[in-house]
């Protein structure tokens, strides 16, 4: 008699599936192999062409667009989860972005608009995700986000995303113990 997979009976969300080379794809594949039921998101129609077939191949229960810069899209994902499972056990935040022009030069040359966009997509979206996930995690849960060495050290090619990922790590640390509804853990994957 073999043991049930470790995530059997668990419902999770992976945000940011782009293609078979994305971190989100590796997370999706591993969590499905571990027995989790999954909802996955992709950013837009362009990424849908790559992401949806991957989600279908892996047997994800929900696959839908979620551009965190578009009002209501993140909320729609949580509504779909609420309708499908009525709960959520974990969520993995695998998104980050900055305008191309602000990824080319020095951090000091980053535009205000580019910096704010990078912070909104890469950091504030995790905070929003946490707020929306909490009510669905009535049995406890886990929220994970992806970081990079550039949050701790100067990695010249990482440019503005270094301070942005440092802010993401600080936000995740600050949310630990601040959950209102549930004993949820916040974890940073480097």
Image: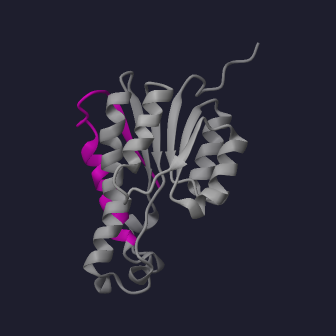
Q: Is residue 88 visible?
A: no
Residue 121 in the magenta stretch? The answer is: no
In the rendered image, residue 170, in percent from the top left (x then y), is placed at 28, 54
Q: Is residue 145 visible?
A: yes
Quadrant hosting residue 77: top left
| Residue placed most toward the observer, 43 or 169 | 43
In the rendered image, residue 152, in percent from the top left (x then y), is placed at 37, 65
Above or below residue 169? Residue 4 is above
> Which residue is at the far top?
1
In the rendered image, residue 68, in percent from the top left (x then y), is placed at 39, 56
Q: Residue at x 69, y 43 (%)?
A: 56
> Dividing the image into 4 quarters, which one contains the N terminus?
top right
Start-end of magenta stretch: 161-190
Q: Residue at x 45, y 64 (%)?
A: 149
| Residue placed most toward the observer, 151 or 15 | 15
In the rendered image, residue 89, in percent from the top left (x then y), is placed at 46, 30
Q: Residue at x 25, y 78 (%)?
A: 112
Horizontal side of residue 112 vs 190, given as left or right:
left
Residue 173 in the magenta stretch? The answer is: yes
Above or below residue 170? Residue 156 is below
Quadrant hosting residue 100: bottom left
> Which residue is at the far right?
1
Above or below residue 166? Residue 104 is below
Q: Residue at x 46, y 35 (%)?
A: 80
Horizontal side of residue 8 vs 3, given as left or right:
left
What colour scheme has been applied to the protein in the rendered image?
one colour
């Amino acid at each position: 008699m073999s043991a049930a997979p470790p995530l059997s009976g668990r419902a999770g969300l992976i945000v940011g599936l782009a293609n078979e080379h994305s971190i989100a794809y590796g997370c999706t594949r591993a969590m499905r192999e571990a027995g989790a039921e999954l909802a996955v998101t992709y950013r837009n129609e362009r990424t849908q062409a790559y992401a949806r077939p991957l989600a279908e191949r892996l047997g994800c229960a929900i696959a839908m667009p979620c551009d965190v810069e578009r009002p209501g899209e993140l909320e729609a994902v949580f509504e779909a989860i609420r309708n499908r499972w009525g709960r959520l056990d974990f969520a993995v935040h695998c998104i980050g972005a900055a305008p191309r022009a602000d990824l080319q030069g020095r951090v000091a040359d980053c535009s205000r608009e580019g910096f704010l966009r990078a912070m909104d997509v890469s950091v504030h979206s995790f905070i929003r995700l946490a707020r929306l996930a909490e009510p669905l995690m009535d049995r406890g849960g886990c929220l994970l986000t992806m970081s990079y060495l550039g949050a701790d050290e100067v990695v010249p090619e990482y440019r503005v995303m270094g301070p942005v990922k440092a802010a993401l790590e600080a936000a995740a640390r600050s949310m630990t113990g601040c959950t209102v509804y549930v004993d949820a853990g916040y974890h940073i994957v480097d």
